[in-house]
Image (cartoon, grey):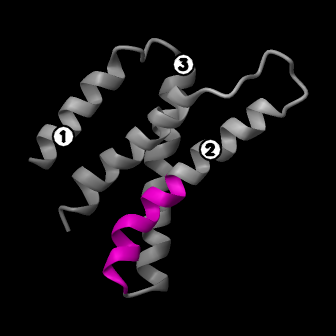
């Protein structure tokens, strides 16, 4: 089931993956979630924090980046919900494939 969810999510996200920005958001979500999972494992024994904490951190990363884009001095920068979705998609991929396997 988890592979099916990851496959469907990847296929949905691939339709707009021509943009380098979306690919960077997906990669950043993947790497950041994997790193925050490693930190959570070393700092706590709580199973829920280890499993869902990296996803919350991934969402915070995506929202923070978009807020920086919105309030940046560049007038062409805007807040984009799809960028947050791509960042979260990278995080969900880590959790569904790598973390739940352990």
**Is residue 51 depicted above or below 57 in this figure?**
below
Q: In which quadrant of the rendered view does residue 33 lie?
A: bottom left
Write the start and end of the magenta stretch as one range. Answer: 46-58
- The residue where tag 3 is placed is 20
Secondary structure of the residue carrying numbered label 1: helix
Q: Which mark is residue 90?
A: none
Tell me the crowding category of disc 1: few under 14, some 14 to 19, or many 20 or more residues within 10 angstroms, Cα based. Answer: some
Residue at screen point 12% across, 38% down: 4
Secondary structure of the residue carrying numbered label 2: helix
The location of residue 96, given as percent across then percent down, is 24, 52
Residue at screen point 34% across, 14% down: 15
- The residue where tag 2 is placed is 63
> Disc 3 to disc 2, how far (Cα)?
18 Å
Residue at screen point 51% across, 27% down: 82
- N-terminal of the pair, mark 3 or mark 2, is 3
- The residue where tag 1 is placed is 5
Of residue 32 and residue 51, the one placed in the foreground of this image is 51
């Amino acid at each position: 089931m988890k592979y099916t969810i990851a496959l469907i999510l990847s296929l949905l996200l691939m339709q707009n993956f021509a943009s380098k920005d979306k690919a960077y958001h997906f990669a950043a979500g993947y790497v950041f979630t994997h790193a925050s999972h490693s930190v959570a494992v070393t700092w706590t024994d709580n199973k829920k924090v280890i499993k869902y904490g990296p996803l919350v951190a991934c969402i915070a990363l995506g929202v923070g980046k978009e807020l920086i884009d919105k309030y940046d001095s560049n007038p062409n920068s805007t807040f984009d919900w799809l960028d947050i979705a791509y960042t979260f998609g990278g995080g969900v991929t880590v959790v569904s494939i790598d973390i739940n396997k352990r």
